[in-house]
């Protein structure tokens, strides 16, 4: 087995046809139906969001009532629908 520190820093990611996809970290738009080479460090996983998605976000919590007054961020990825 390969130690984690020696793992490749990129991954090939296939994005399904029929939608455009946003890179979660950079908001770069990628067309579906193709394979992309994505950065994949231990700190930054390759995450892609389908156009038209809405994602509510808040700070990291261990359980749902841990921080009741934490601000929320709503991310809207324009596109389909």
Image (spheres, rainbow, N blue to C red):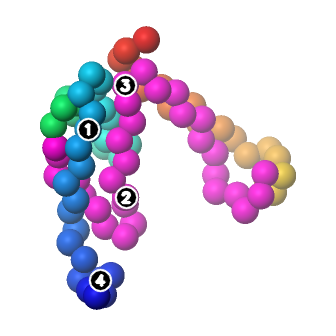
Q: Earlier in the sequence, mark 2 or mark 3?
A: 2
The image position of residue 56, as x and y in percent, is: 60, 35
Q: Name the element at disc 3.
A: loop
Q: Which residues are magenta?
A: 35-64
Q: Position of residue 46 (x, y in %)?
A: 33, 53
Please, what secondary structure does the residue beneath circle 2 have? loop
Numbered badge on residue 15: 1
Asked where in the image residue 21 lies, by quadrant, the reply is: top left
**Crowdedness of circle 2 by 10 Å Cα count: few (<14), some, many (20+)?**
some
In front: label 4 or label 1 = 1
Q: Which residue is mark 2?
A: 45
Q: Earlier in the sequence, mark 4 or mark 3?
A: 4
Residue at 73 percent of width and 46 percent of height: 70
Residue shown at 31% from the left, 67% from the top: 41
Q: Is residue 15 left or right of residue 74?
A: left
> Circle 4 sits on which residue?
5
Find the distance from the CA under tag 4 to the CA under tag 1: 27 Å
- Return the x and y of residue 52 as percentages of the image width and height: 42, 21
N-terminal of the two: label 2 or label 1?
Answer: 1
Circle on res. 39: none
- Mark 4 lies on a secondary structure that is helix
| Image location (x, y in percent) of residue 71 | 69, 41
Separation of marks 2 and 4 at Cα, in angstroms: 15 Å
Query: First in sequence: mark 2 or mark 4?
Result: 4
């Amino acid at each position: 087995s390969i130690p984690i520190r020696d793992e490749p820093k990129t991954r090939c990611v296939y994005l399904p046809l029929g939608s455009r996809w946003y890179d979660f970290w950079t908001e770069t738009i990628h067309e579906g139906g193709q394979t992309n080479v994505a950065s994949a460090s231990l700190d930054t996983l390759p995450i892609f969001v389908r156009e038209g998605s809405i994602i509510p976000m808040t700070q990291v919590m261990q359980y749902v009532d841990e921080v009741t007054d934490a601000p929320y961020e709503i991310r809207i990825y324009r596109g389909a629908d």
